[in-house]
Image (cartoon, rainbow, N blue to C red):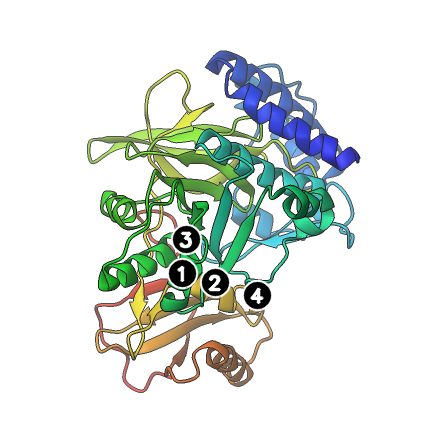
Amino acid sequence: MLQYFSLLNHWMEARHWRQLSPEETRRRQVDSFRRVFEHARVHSPFYRRLYREAGVDQLVIREMTDIERVPEIDKSMLRAVPTQEIMTRPITPDLVPIKTSGSTGEPFVIYQTKAEQYTSHVRVFAMLWELGWRPWHRILLLWRLEPDAELEVEQELGILTRLRQSLGLFQRDLASIVTPMPEVVRWLDAHPDARVLWATVGVATLLCEHLEQQGRSYRFGPVVVTSETLSQEQRARFENLLGGPVVSHYGLMECPTIGYSPDNTGMFRIQPHACMLELLNRRVENDRPLGDIVLTNLVNHTMPFIRYRTGDTAGVLDRPDEPAKMLGPILGRLDDVITLPGGGRFAHHHAHALFMDFSACTQFKFVQYPDGGLALRLSLAPGAGRDTTRVDALARWRSRYPDVPLAVEFVDLMPVDPGTGKFKNIERLAEAAPVGQQ
């Protein structure tokens, strides 16, 4: 019962903080920052050592100028130490481990309590509420899970299932991202009462391609796509074929559901009770003012992320509620979608679902050469053998695509895109495949 009250309080905070002035929002964020900062420097060996060496182990956080004295961190610093040193408590079976998407090149495991993890679902519902959704509106998710999957939050919070069964509230239906598009369309047609469509940009693109071929369209609203970057062309296409408003959802595994962009301005509304953002290294590039996004997760005290460099860059808005409540357009990754032999299409989340937990590699990337040939590039994990890894990787691939040829290429560290700081795990190449490459 305590967990229900905690999540309800998180919902009420989301609603209340939306009404606060930028000044009051920042003041409250400073208070929240102080709590996670003091907790981390006492209970986390990593942060205790970092703050002692930086001379801030006795710092009292009263205002933003104090926060600016706290050293920033990045993923490379966190990878350099055992995960347990970052934690503020032992790693136990009751914690929820979540693996990042590998957008900076290599996945990373994050731990949190179930209560901390479930707040991200609360923020999703708060976002949808502001977009016009109500608990009696059905949500369709075109996602990585299978149709009969039950989310862990639904298992833990049985009241959601009971409300769905008895009152018809919080109705949601799933279709897997690997479902053939004709079947996806039949699934959409079977739910004419649905209001919300939730998908990834790549899968939504594939759906739109199929709808164009069939001369079909839908009028969902809102259409939520999980990407911080959405081109004007993509937005217009989704609005024309799927409905609107088309909403970009911005979040990281380090802090799920940071904010959302509900229109073509590209500006993001932040959920400030859960995260504090800073824009550092402000500069002008190609006549465009930019800043680097630094995040503090105000919710996760189990594995804190305090003044964490996300690797994301945003346009500077120069307005009083930035970045406490608003954030400019984010320069993120625009993944390719590749065409398989026979006309099938393959996108980022197809790759993610297949290989994100493939422990034999530290990085993976699908590339398509100009002749149509498809290759999986792998950076081997320490101790992994090439022959065994190749066999295991091809077995995974053939479990989903048994008739599609795939070469396996072993490479060293694969760099991120210098323009976005992100790592693309799907890319169409201009150069031909190396002779004899396997």
Residue 306 lies left or right of residue 312; in this view the side is: right
The percent position of residue 335, horizontal first and vertical second, equals: 33, 56
State the residue position of label 1: 348
CA distance for labels 2 and 3: 12 Å
State the residue position of label 2: 352
Residue 410 or 325: which is nearer the viewer? 325
Foreground: disc 4 or disc 1: 1
CA distance for labels 3 and 4: 19 Å
CA distance for labels 4 and 2: 9 Å
First in residue order: circle 1 vs circle 3 = 3
The percent position of residue 408, horizontal first and vertical second, equals: 41, 79
Residue type for callout 2: His
The percent position of residue 407, horizontal first and vertical second, equals: 38, 81
CA distance for labels 1 and 2: 6 Å
Foreground: disc 3 or disc 4: 3
State the quadrant of the C terminus: bottom left
Question: Quadrant of residue 369 in the image?
Answer: bottom left
State the residue position of label 4: 357
Disc assigned to residue 200? 3
Residue 37 visible to an observer of this rendering: no
First in residue order: circle 3 vs circle 4 = 3
For the residues bearing labels 2 and 3, Cβ distance under 8 angstroms = no
